Image (spheres, coloured by chain):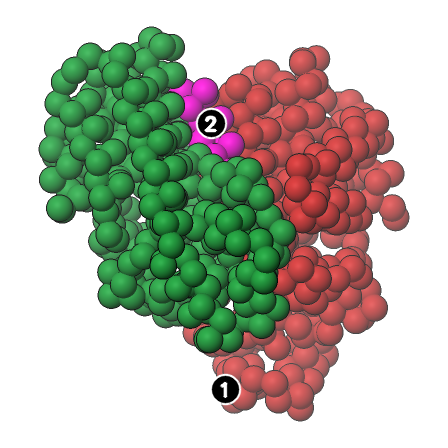
Chain colours: A green, B red
Amino acid sequence: MQATSLYQPVQERLDGVVDGLREMAKQRFPLLSELLDYVFSAPGKRMRPAITLLASNFSPHDETLTNTMATAVEMLHIATLIHDDTVDDSALRRGRATISKLWGDNAAVLVGDYIFAASGTFVCDTGNIRVIRRFAETIMELSSGELQELSDIFNPNQTKEQYFERIYNKTASLFTTASESGAVLSGLSENYVGALRDFGYNLGMAFQIVDDILDFDGTEQEIGKPVGNDLVHGILTLPALIAMERYPNDNVIPELFKHPGDEDLLQRAVDMVKDTSILTECYAIAGDYCGKAQSSIMSLPRNPARDSLEEIIVFVTARRV
Amino acid sequence: MQATSLYQPVQERLDGVVDGLREMAKQRFPLLSELLDYVFSAPGKRMRPAITLLASNFSPHDETLTNTMATAVEMLHIATLIHDDTVDDSALRRGRATISKLWGDNAAVLVGDYIFAASGTFVCDTGNIRVIRRFAETIMELSSGELQELSDIFNPNQTKEQYFERIYNKTASLFTTASESGAVLSGLSENYVGALRDFGYNLGMAFQIVDDILDFDGTEQEIGKPVGNDLVHGILTLPALIAMERYPNDNVIPELFKHPGDEDLLQRAVDMVKDTSILTECYAIAGDYCGKAQSSIMSLPRNPARDSLEEIIVFVTARRV
């Protein structure tokens, strides 16, 4: 399934957002233009800005506001990816070389800062302080999520509660803001705003859990990185945490964390996760979040935007990439 | 001269701002607390927040707003320093090890992002969209200034115009915003807001030019880094640009840029700048900006805050650190 067909009710507006990003790349000095052109022309699911636009489709309103917000949301997501790739020392992102790889870490840090700030000026253009403030808090949450991950690297003593807090910060936070801001800026009642915020939160949690499952379950070709990549980098995700809970004695994961890079231990850890019902359990947890996302929007009037949000829920669990 | 004695009319409020920063360090997870505690307890001139507070001292107003703004301004400055030190690979900042040195580049990138965003939430608390927008634009300017510097590294073909644009972005931009926001949030008329914006701009330009002079003129002990450090890193500042303009034939600087790290060429370049009237010419240019900063505030009512702003102008040119 092509992600883009999901967004049918707002596809035209979304295309406008993506074109707007490419326009932004025309900057005064060459290095900045090149960098922006490279990042804004990269392919992407555009799921977050699509959610902002869909969430705004329950009430007629000034669409320049929500288009601007959707642009800001996508820019924030892109800025985050640039800094994450720098921090993770990743060479590839969606099959293309990363900014750090091509222009070096320094340019990546600075262009990330630039796009963070530029996204902030877009949100300012909405003129809505509530949304602006929520946006700034989201950037704090995104960076604390990454810092939490960094601080627990190769630490085998983590809880599922810590995991859920971390994935809220690093992923669900922006999904929540994407959805909530579309609702607020289109002037929905607080009930509907709350419903769409809950939708964003639950969808974001499910999205990240599925991401963490695919790290074990996908093929290298599908996910664009080696299977078990999180464990290689010392990151404990839900499948690994359940595996350690289920087999507390002589578990191979703490052993692997003591010997990072040991291929044999890695293979044994991946096999332990894959050869059991652990991934099924993880899918069930993601499914719970999807169920909650689904219930959240049941109070909204049925229209093509709601249908599209429901299809996004299905896509998030079924996706392989 | 102790920088702090300069800020007498707002010293108590400034101390409150600095204490507020330290309070912020009490965060939920240890790594973030440690990082914030380390950066917020570092000594600093606190010149930018002092300017915000002084600029707000021409009209009675709700001081919680301008205290909050001053906090945001100092946080933004600190976030910038953290990313700059990471990009420049600096080991020391004001005699203390940098975050990158102690916790690694990754933590430095992420905690910088966190503090950028946190500063944004403080500005949101002022509830003033004009100021919030200006603040986001300032972050864009700061990062483009750094990107411009990066893009012209070891490039001998640069103009003074490019230099002035770059130092506006990397330094004067935040001075302008610091001063202007204090004026706006204390409810001054547009005339006075304009006067204080001009003050900030001209002071910021002078500040950076003096910084660039001290890179040649200071001793290693005074400036905390080797003399000629900018040239070592391939950065052309005003003294070097004037030297190349004055001695276009067989100038040693392009030669040095072809052989980075050559100690002999570096010494000859530094001597060329120091043995001539170039630094005097640079001080004269900085002096011009100071004169304009001085004229800008002549229209403001004379009060202790204006006296203090005038003393800051003198301090900026006379400083050795």
Q: Distance between the residues labelled 1 and 2?
A: 49 Å
Q: Chain for mark 1?
A: B
> Which residues fall within the magenta stretch?
A127-141
In the displayed structure, would residue A212 be above or below residue A104?
above
| Along the line of sight, the residue nearer the viewer: B70 or A317 | A317
Query: Residue at label 2?
Result: A134
> In this view of the protein, can residue A8 be seen by the observer?
yes
What secondary structure do most residues of the magenta stretch adopt? helix
In the rendered structure, the answer to whether residue B183 lies left or right of residue A29 reads: right
| Amino acid of disc 1 | Lys
Residue found at x 13% / y 46%: A1
Residue B174 in the image: state x and y as whole percent: 58, 42
B240 falls in the magenta region: no
In the displayed structure, would residue B294 be above or below residue B233?
above
**Residue A173, quarter of the rendered image:** top left
Q: Chain for mark 2?
A: A
Nearest-to-viewer mark from 1 and 2:
2
Residue B274 in the image: state x and y as whole percent: 71, 75
Helix, strand or loop at mark 2: helix
> In this view of the protein, can residue B282 be seen by the observer?
no
Query: Residue at label 1?
Result: B258
Residue found at x 27% / y 63%: A219
Residue A249 in the image: state x and y as whole percent: 59, 57
In the rendered structure, the answer to whether residue A37 lies left or right of residue B133 reads: left
| Along the line of sight, the residue nearer the viewer: A230 or A119 | A230
Residue found at x 72% / y 22%: B57
In the displayed structure, would residue B255 be above or below residue B287?
below
Residue found at x 21% / y 40%: A315
Structural crowding at the residue carrying mark 2, measured as other residues with C-alpha within 10 Å and reported as few (<14), some (14–19) or many (≥20): some
| Amino acid of disc 2 | Arg
